[in-house]
Image: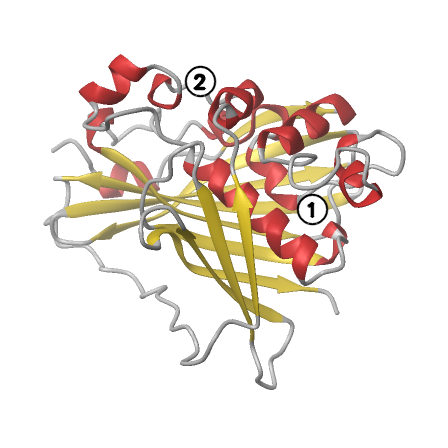
């Protein structure tokens, strides 16, 4: 069978070295729209686009030093996968401390789980980065492989998030540039689906779509700007499910609910296309933060 869970889960961890600097951080921030929503020299934007007092929006870790592309999710024994059947299903990052502007780290990657969803298999790739000061961040990447379920494995816990039955506490409309995907791909995701109209048509789209991880970054920046006072170092974790496509040139509507429970310090978020009747883009999205 294309997926042999026992063999894949027993595969040894993989390690690779990562390195990044302020140029990589600024390029990523421009790729998720920093500097485009206000005057480019607004101090609230310069904190993400100018090396003086530069902050790092935590979703940067998905591309830092080559990011998740270096995790090698599809190069493990026991996995013989048709990449045409693969979808990026979800993403979670946990920050153990703020991400430095200039950094070197070792990334250790493993296959944490394989779930049987019936018509699809879900692979959970875990990547943990550590530098000279200790653990830095952990990424869990969920990969759906269509047609590879039904092997009798565990289904896995539900990660669905129920939004409050009330209006959002905050709403932000984020216009996304027509060339946003062309800029974002310079951070390392060169999939032609996001640039080549002919390739996009072969994939069933009338034009190139935005990277899911770009929408992921645009949404987190909106949360940081709207609720966290522009202080990206307050983010502790960020998880989402990729629920639909988004086209460059559309407006992303980000709704945020502050959770009013004892646990606190948790934001529930939805991201939709304002141009297509709130078609879902990100769902089951949660940000935890330092008060």
Residue bearing the label numbered 2? 190
Determine which quarter of the picture holds residue 30: top right
Measured as percent of width and height from the top left, residue 116 is found at 19, 52
Disc 1 element: strand
Left or right of residue 46: residue 185:
left
Query: Callout 2 environment at 10 Å: few (<14), some (14 to 19), or many (20+)?
Result: some
For marks 1 and 2 on the same chain, the one whose residue lies earlier in the sequence: 1
Q: Quadrant of the N terminus?
A: top left
Mark closer to the observer (1, 2): 2
Residue bearing the label numbered 1? 135
Q: Which mark is residue 264?
A: none
Q: Where is 16 relative to 42, above or below?
A: above
Q: Where is 118 relative to 48, above or below?
A: below
Measured as percent of width and height from the top left, residue 212 is found at 42, 38
Measured as percent of width and height from the top left, residue 276 is found at 32, 47
Camera-nearest residue between 116 and 11: 116
Residue at 73 percent across and 42 percent down: it is 99
Left or right of residue 275: residue 96:
right
Q: In which quarter of the image is the C terminus?
A: bottom right
Point out the residue furthest to the bottom here: 262
| CA distance separating discs 1 and 2 | 29 Å
Point out the residue furthest to the right here: 52
Measured as percent of width and height from the top left, residue 124 is found at 37, 46
Camera-nearest residue between 72 and 183: 183
Circles 1 and 2, Cβ within 8 Å, touching? The answer is no
Left or right of residue 274: residue 17:
right
Camera-nearest residue between 222 and 267: 222
Query: Callout 1 environment at 10 Å: few (<14), some (14 to 19), or many (20+)?
Result: some
Residue at 33 percent across and 22 percent down: it is 193
């Amino acid at each position: 069978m294309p997926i042999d869970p026992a063999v894949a889960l027993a595969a040894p961890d993989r390690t690779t070295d990562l390195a990044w600097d302020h140029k990589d951080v600024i390029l990523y921030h421009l790729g998720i729209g920093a500097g485009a929503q206000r005057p480019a020299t607004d101090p609230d934007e310069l904190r993400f686009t100018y090396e003086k007092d530069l902050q790092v929006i935590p979703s940067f870790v998905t591309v830092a030093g080559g990011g998740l592309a270096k995790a090698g999710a599809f190069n493990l024994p026991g996995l013989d996968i048709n990449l045409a059947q693969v979808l990026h299903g979800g993403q979670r990052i946990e920050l153990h401390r703020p991400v430095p502007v200039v950094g070197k780290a070792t990334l250790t990657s493993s296959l944490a789980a394989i779930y049987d969803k019936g018509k699809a298999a879900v692979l959970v790739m875990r990547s943990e980065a550590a530098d000279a000061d200790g653990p830095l961040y952990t990424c869990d990447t969920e990969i759906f492989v269509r047609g590879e379920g039904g092997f009798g494995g565990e289904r896995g816990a539900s990660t669905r998030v129920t939004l409050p039955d009330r209006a959002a506490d905050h709403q932000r409309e984020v216009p996304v540039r027509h060339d946003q995907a062309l800029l974002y791909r310079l951070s390392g995701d060169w999939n032609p689906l996001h640039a080549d109209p002919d390739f996009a048509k072969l994939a069933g789209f009338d034009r190139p779509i935005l990277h899911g991880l770009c929408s992921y970054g645009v949404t987190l920046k909106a949360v940081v700007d709207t609720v966290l006072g522009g202080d990206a170092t307050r983010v502790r974790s960020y998880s989402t499910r990729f629920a639909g496509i988004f086209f460059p040139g559309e407006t992303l509507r980000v709704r945020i609910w502050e959770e009013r429970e004892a646990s606190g310090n948790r934001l529930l978020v939805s991201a939709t296309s304002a141009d297509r009747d709130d078609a879902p883009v990100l769902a089951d999205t949660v940000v935890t933060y330092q008060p």
